[in-house]
């Protein structure tokens, strides 16, 4: 492996901000106390492409196009509880973007020959999550056999787990894996109580990382097959690059793209009437949407006195994504 080369191809695509996250179901047969899945998604049989709820593969493909996705990560919940759906979406993604569109799948199960066979030609990489209670005897686990079988069948296969006490037990599995990805343990709304019961606390007020969890993983870090993925990286690098890719493809002429990949624009609520000052602009520099005007943020700010109605400046994720901030303009 070359220096600075990541052990898993899926990680390379992720580092580029070029991975679409396909949340295929919120259903799961396991009850991991550290699961960070939101209450909005946990247990619900819904599908999301990035942050957008979708019903069909075609809708997911449209989301992938907005970011020029080079690959897809299929996650959940437990994707293998809906194998037909996984096959349908992956088949259409490969058909649309070609074999080079890299697809990796996360699972908390140890798939056998039949389950893996159904994914051949559709999924390139399998990322298994053996439960924490099996780490100390991983050599006897069905997960290690499944990973070896997957590699024999042509998949890239490895484990992806959060940093937890006892993780050093996975050292015995490394010779049978292509990679071991260790995610920094993350504090969330649905696992906070379980974290507190175990004496854990957030590392700081800026990120979701749990204090001290890197120390648990330290004995494994430095091995060429082991990759550490921090909470800060996910927030400040991975997400940022993905948003920038989406913004560049979807921003309107008047949307301002920030260095974080969000977009900023001004909003005028005055019964849909177009202010006189906007008539001096090219028509593409404003849009009438749902009875309000959306336009350049600085026009709304600097010429507020010439514009009637309610005014504000909005910052949000691109492609009509999550609203980050609304600033009223007097």
Image (cartoon, helix red, strand yellow):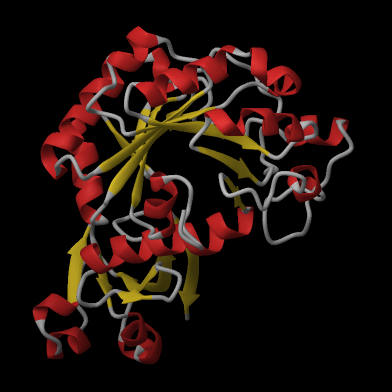
Residue depicted at 66% across the width and 12% down the height: 140
- Is 199 placed left or right of 241 in the picture? right
Q: Is residue 111 above or below residue 222?
A: above
In this view, the residue in front, 240 or 299, is 240
Which quadrant of the view contains residue 236? bottom right
Q: Position of residue 306 (x, y in %)?
A: 31, 89
- Is 125 placed left or right of 229 in the picture? left
Q: Position of residue 23 (x, y in %)?
A: 40, 33
In this view, the residue in front, 51 or 23, is 23
In this view, the residue in front, 194 or 83, is 83
Q: Position of residue 329 (x, y in %)?
A: 46, 78
Q: Is residue 170 above or below residue 320?
A: above
- Is 61 placed left or right of 161 in the picture? left
Residue depicted at 43% across the width and 76% down the height: 259
Residue depicted at 53% across the width and 21% down the height: 108
In this view, the residue in front, 318 or 285, is 318
Whether residue 195 can be seen here: yes
**Count of picture labels:** 0
């Amino acid at each position: 492996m070359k220096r600075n080369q990541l052990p898993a191809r899926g990680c390379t695509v992720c580092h580029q901000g070029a991975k679409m996250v396909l949340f295929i179901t919120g259903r799961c047969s396991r009850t991991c106390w550290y699961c960070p899945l939101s209450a909005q998604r946990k247990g619900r049989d819904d599908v999301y492409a990035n942050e957008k709820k979708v019903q069909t593969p075609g809708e997911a493909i449209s989301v992938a196009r907005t970011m020029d996705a080079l690959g897809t990560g299929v996650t959940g919940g437990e994707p293998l509880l809906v194998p037909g759906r996984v096959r349908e979406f992956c088949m259409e993604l490969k058909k649309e973007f070609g074999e080079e569109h890299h697809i990796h799948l996360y699972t908390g199960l140890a798939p056998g020959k039949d389950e893996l066979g159904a994914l051949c030609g559709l999924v390139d990489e399998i990322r298994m999550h053996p439960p924490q209670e099996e780490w100390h005897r991983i050599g006897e686990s069905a997960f290690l056999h499944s990973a070896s079988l997957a590699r024999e069948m042509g998949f890239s296969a490895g484990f992806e787990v959060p940093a937890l006490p006892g993780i050093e037990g996975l050292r015995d599995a490394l010779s049978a894996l292509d990679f071991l990805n260790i995610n920094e343990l993350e504090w969330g709304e649905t696992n906070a109580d379980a974290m507190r019961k175990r004496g854990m606390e957030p590392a700081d007020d800026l990120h979701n990382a749990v204090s001290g969890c890197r120390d648990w993983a330290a004995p494994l870090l430095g091995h060429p097959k082991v990759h550490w993925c921090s909470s800060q990286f996910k927030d400040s690098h991975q997400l940022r690059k993905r948003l920038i890719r989406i913004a560049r493809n979807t921003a309107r002429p008047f949307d301002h793209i920030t260095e974080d990949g969000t977009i900023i624009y001004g909003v005028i609520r005055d019964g849909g009437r177009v202010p006189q000052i906007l008539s001096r602009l090219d028509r593409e520099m404003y849009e009438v949407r749902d009875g309000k005007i959306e336009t350049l943020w600085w026009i709304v700010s600097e010429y507020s006195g010439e514009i009637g109605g309610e005014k504000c400046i909005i910052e949000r994720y691109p492609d009509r994504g999550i609203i980050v901030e609304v600033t009223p303009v007097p």
